[in-house]
Image (cartoon, helix red, strand yellow):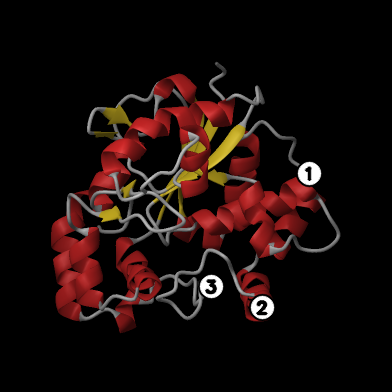
């Protein structure tokens, strides 16, 4: 089988959706923005329950972690079975082995794009998205066994702590290329960062097309679309998916004692990626 999966990986609320919507617009090369509710066509999620049901060919229980992990290799092989050169796959899973099952198998992987965000800002978005208090979110993203539980739409996602997740994708020797992007750099210089994404995927870089795709995936555009048509990826616990999308919000919104706790817990990885001096 071809090594055709290009993982679009991140911890939740770190810029994965924005990147996929940019790519949807760049690939479409249309004169108007792609609907935010069509962006999933560009990058399949690796935890969609109906994909597991399809390969099982029988009723499944998404809450049965063992069964879902045993089905995962079949789901991923099903993705690459189209024989395409590239299959973009969105994941929030850490690059780890869960109960003897490699979540990100080398033998099916072409490359990866990994997006990370200052955890002090990420945890605020995380709390809003999952309907948690700031304290609950800080505890959750710092827990070594953090996982998104299964529901009707998705199977369990094994994320681990923010630091563990980042390390799993960015450290150690990788048998394939991994493009690492910081959300803050994407905000400051989207043209440079998204050019890297296009080049990583082996597509030609067209300046006008790039500028248009960046405009069509701006936070203002995405927010306006969500107001008009809603967004299928919004959780039931949150009022909006595209709420703020800013950097540095933690300075006014995250309680000082929680800032201190996050910095203490994640200091090493934050420092490694330029979030602490």
Q: Given the current orientation, which residue lies at the most extreme front position? A: 58
Badge 3: residue crowd in 10 Å (few <14, some 14–19, many ≥20): many
Q: Which is more N-terminal, label 2 or label 3?
A: 2
Q: Which is more N-terminal, label 2 or label 1?
A: 1
For label 2, the SS is helix
Q: Quadrant of residue 276?
A: bottom left
Q: Is residue 40 left or right of residue 168?
A: right
Q: Is residue 54 left or right of residue 121?
A: right
Instruction: Return the residue at label 2.
Output: 224
Residue lying at 28% horizontally and 35% vertically, measured from the top left: 96
Q: Given the current orientation, which residue lies at the most extreme top position? A: 1
Image x and y of residue 162, in percent: 27, 53
Residue lying at 50% horizontally and 35% vertically, measured from the top left: 57
For label 3, the SS is loop
User: Marks 1 and 2, Cα distance to the nearest angstrom?
Assistant: 26 Å
For label 1, the SS is loop
Q: Nearer the viewer, residue 233 or 56?
A: 56
Is residue 176 in view?
Answer: yes
Q: Nearer the viewer, residue 170 or 94?
A: 94
Q: Are the residues flagged by discs 1 and 3 in contact, CB closer than 8 Å?
A: no
Q: Is residue 263 left or right of residue 212?
A: left
User: Marks 1 and 3, Cα distance to the nearest angstrom?
Assistant: 27 Å
Identify whether 123 is placed above or below 101: below
Image x and y of residue 61, in percent: 36, 47
Instruction: Return the residue at label 3.
Output: 242
Q: Nearer the viewer, residue 61 or 188?
A: 61
Q: Determine which of the numbered discs, if any, sits on residue 206 in the image.
A: 1
């Amino acid at each position: 089988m071809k090594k055709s999966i290009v993982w679009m990986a991140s911890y939740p609320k770190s810029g994965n959706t924005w990147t996929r919507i940019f790519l949807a617009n760049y690939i479409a090369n249309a004169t108007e923005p792609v609907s935010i509710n069509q962006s999933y066509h560009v990058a399949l999620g690796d935890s969609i329950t109906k994909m597991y049901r399809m390969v099982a060919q029988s009723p499944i229980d998404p809450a049965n972690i063992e069964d879902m992990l045993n089905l995962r290799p079949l789901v991923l092989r099903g993705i690459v079975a189209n024989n395409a050169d590239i299959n973009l796959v969105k994941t929030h899973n850490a690059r780890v082995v869960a109960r003897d099952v490699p979540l990100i198998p080398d033998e099916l992987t072409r490359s990866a794009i990994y997006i990370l965000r200052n955890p002090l800002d990420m945890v605020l978005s995380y709390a809003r998205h999952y309907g948690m208090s700031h304290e609950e979110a800080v505890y959750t993203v710092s827990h070594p066994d953090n996982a998104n539980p299964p529901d009707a739409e998705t199977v369990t996602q094994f994320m681990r702590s923010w630091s563990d997740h980042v390390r799993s994708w960015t450290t150690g020797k990788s048998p394939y290329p991994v493009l690492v992007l910081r959300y803050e750099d994407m905000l400051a210089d989207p043209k440079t960062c998204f050019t890297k994404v296009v080049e990583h995927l082996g597509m030609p870089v067209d300046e006008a097309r790039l500028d248009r795709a960046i405009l069509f995936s701006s936070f203002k555009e995405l927010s306006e679309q969500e107001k008009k048509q809603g967004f299928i990826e919004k959780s039931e616990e949150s009022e909006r998916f595209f709420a703020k999308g800013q950097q540095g919000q933690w300075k006014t919104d995250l309680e000082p004692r929680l800032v201190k706790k996050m910095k203490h817990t994640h200091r090493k990885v934050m420092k490694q990626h330029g979030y602490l001096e």
